[in-house]
Amino acid sequence: MSAEVAIQKFSFPFSCSARQDEASQTGPIQVKALELRGLPESPALSPPSAVAFVGILAGCAKPAGDGPKTPVDDVQAPQSAVLSRRNVFEKLAAEAEDQRPTAKRQLSSESASRSIDVVKKCNVRAEEPQRNLKTGAEVGPRCTATAAVGRRRRRKDLFANSDIFHRLDSHVIRAGAELKEKRVHDVAAIVQSIASIAKNELEKIRTIWVWLCHNIEYDIGGFLGRSEKLCSPEEVIASGRGVCCGYAGLCMEMCRLVGLQCQEVAGHSKGIGYRQGQSLRNVTSDHLWNAVLLGGQWFLMDACWGAGRVDMEHESFVKRFDDFYFLTDPEEFIESHFPDEARWQLLEAPVTLEEFEKRVFKTSAFFATGLRLIQPHHCHLVTGQSGRQSLSPRKYVNKVREKTPGNNVSSSNLFSSDEGEANISLGFSRPVTFTYEITPQQDFLHCGTPEQKESSHSSFGLLTVSQRSMNLQLLPPASGTYNLRLYARPESASTLLSWVCSFTVECREARATEEIPENPYLSWGLQPAAASLGVSGSNRGSEVAEVEEGRFKLTLSTSRSLMMLCELVHPDLETSIAKCCLVSQIQPEILTCHVLCPSRGFYRLSVFVRDFEKTDMKFQNVANFLLHCKGKVADRDELFPPNLSSTCGPGTRTSEAGLSKFSHTAALVSTPQGKCNITFHNQRDLELHTTLTRAGERKNAAFPLARHLFCTHTDSKVTVSVGLPHAGTYRLGLYARTAPGGEFNPMCDFVLRNSCEQAGLPFPCVYAAWKKGCVLFEPRVGLLDAASWVRFRVRIPGAQRVCVVGHGRTDLKLNKSRVWEAEVFSGEGVAELKLAANLGDSGEMAVLMTFNVKKPS
């Protein structure tokens, strides 16, 4: 057959390189090199055409010098040069006929026609760079695509998402069920039925893929050697089960029947029986998958992995359709599949077997969640001994040591940072929830722990999540080798977390450490959902917080009014004691938590919030902080009083009640001299009540703690005077009656710290007649010396008469400032003095307050 006629019958993909002679940019083209390598082709096809070679070389020719390439249409070669080239090509075509390899599969007429179009397109695209085309020895199945479009198409270029196949998939699943019920085992009949509504190549291969994944189960018995492995299409269909060769062979046969070019690809996979980090050199490949030609470009798929997973613990197959392995992008497919022939990687820069062995195993959920690996890029991590006896928050892993003798993992797989800290970091573009699980090493990658879980309670590391990344710092509990699995899910999802990637962790020498509290809330620092819950920032990051002097302060900024609850956990701290270590202050734009650490070691501080007004809402975890107290601790006597309100200090609640302009805006108040005055404004004229308590209040005290409080209410200003009897920590509670006749509701608590060892004197005992507007100027103490003169000065609005009653009665006089005053003798043997006043027309005297008189010594 002549070369001119041959071009009308066939074409096949190849690579070429040619350049013009340096003498002239427009002169005759001199052929310098032509190397070609064909893919498996049909024995019925004729040898390659010289005319086809002329066309492709004209499109790929490189002009002399560095000038721009000349489009084919502008090349005017002399007729003699064309004839000379044709003779050369006819000779090369004849040689190619003798050297052409034996075909394995027959190309469909559709594929052959497309290949002709590819060659013709190359003839009219001489302006496109051809420098990246490899020689014949390097050419792979991707050459047809690169020659045709110049850029490899990705899966997303074929279809945005699998939803577009909903109608097609439903048809295939329904038809497959009907065929199975009718016991139809003929491949051609099945293909005709399922592909009847397919309109193009993509839909044809989709029907085959979906049918395989839903109708063929993995043959566990065949894999374990308990039964013969089924690989022929007829056996696989009849039994409904097969191993990888059954899936791949049946896929190729079905593709042939619908006119698609499909290949079986042999290689290694990180599936059942794979040990992470193991060397695959000199190991026979154990897996088969498929490559299919669509639109002149090869795509990869694995129906065996798409159909489900094997549960080795129960030796069963779990059907689970995984669409990720349908036309998977080569850059992602290579993470788990390594072909024997590098060309079937479909990568511009093929990955070596050694690199494949070292790579971190990533599941399909890793890519579906939109994750990317920041560090490490190798699957094996090593921790070591730092020589210190306690955990450092940032550097608790030593530098990598020499490979342990007998370890089956290559030393080239080991990862460690320069500072010896074992870190794992993942990036993401959309909010993601993470957790992890670390367990003693098991033989194989796909054994033991489940592929999905709700949460984990591991205390062997610090997992922190920022806005765009996750970081996990590991601390194995003892020497040995461990399996580490990371789990993740989109933050908006309500499903279980899915296994996304795995590592092995080698701890060569454990060290004495302090136990880290379990964190059931997945991560440390602000949770990814913090912003949506109303928390916009924190004064602390996700790293370990060092506690100084046994005290720690956390502040969170908020975008709206929130309520807050806090939880403190330490391995040796009882819950009742832990509650006395927390003080929370809730303000409109700031949440504050004060923490005391009475023991050394690590603490988990968890914060929960809800909208302030929505009392029916549940509190949700918004942040978790790991605190480390390794120096001075808080004394047990310094702990906060029990039964503190969740709203200490002025804040949102006091503002809504109309209490404002507090003299002390913090929840913690220090009283170096045992005395203080807290003032504020009562704009709504609420009826107020105050209480004073402390832990371990003395029952034999001379005066109750209520005698160490004194309230003065004038106009809208309120003054709460405190005189503390002993050193220690006290709770000052402020209550208000917001509705007439209603109950007193808590407004806020103050924590009073008294460092003064001198005992404070009590205030007078006040009765109900002491009302708003009454002011006591003198005496301000409620315990008077016996047989002494005491000056009384008091303002009592509306009083007609005021007197002090002891052994006798002393009337006070009203001065020009509307203050009642007089000198009063306390007397001897008198237990108390009473301040009384006539507040109406009845002439009766009401007791306002009483003063105790000291007994003579």
Image: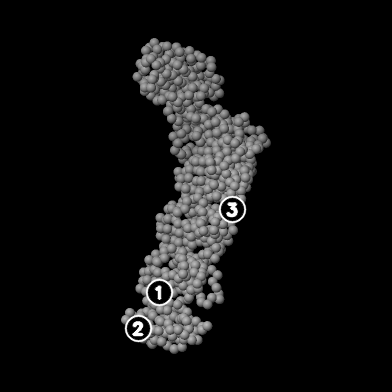
Residue shown at the point (53%, 15%) measured from the top left:
98
Q: Which residue is mark 1?
A: 712
Q: Which residue is mark 2?
A: 814
Query: To which quarter of the image does residue 698 belong?
Result: bottom right
Residue shown at the point (48%, 37%) measured from the top left:
168
Alpha carbon distance from label 1 to label 3: 51 Å
Q: Which residue is mark 3?
A: 515
Q: Amino acid at mark 3?
A: Glu
Residue shown at the point (47%, 59%) measured from the top left:
593
Query: To which quarter of the image does residue 130 belong?
Result: top left
**Which mark is nearer the camera, 2 or 3?**
2
Residue shown at the point (66%, 33%) measured from the top left:
228
2 and 1 marks in contact (CB < 8 Å):
no
Q: Where does residue 161 sit, x and y in percent of width and height?
A: 46, 39
- Is residue 458 visible to us here? no
Q: Where does residue 458 sit, x and y in percent of width and height?
A: 57, 50
Disc nearer the start of the sequence (2/3)? 3
* Left or right: 814, with 279 as reference point: left
Q: Where does residue 566 sit, x and y in percent of width and height?
A: 50, 59
Q: Amino acid at mark 1?
A: Thr
- 579 up-or-down from 279: above or below: below
In-front residue for pair 793/224? 793
Q: Where does residue 89 sit, x and y in percent of width and height?
A: 46, 14
- The numbered disc on residue 214 is none
* Left or right: 35, with 310 as reference point: left
- Is residue 517 visible to us here? yes
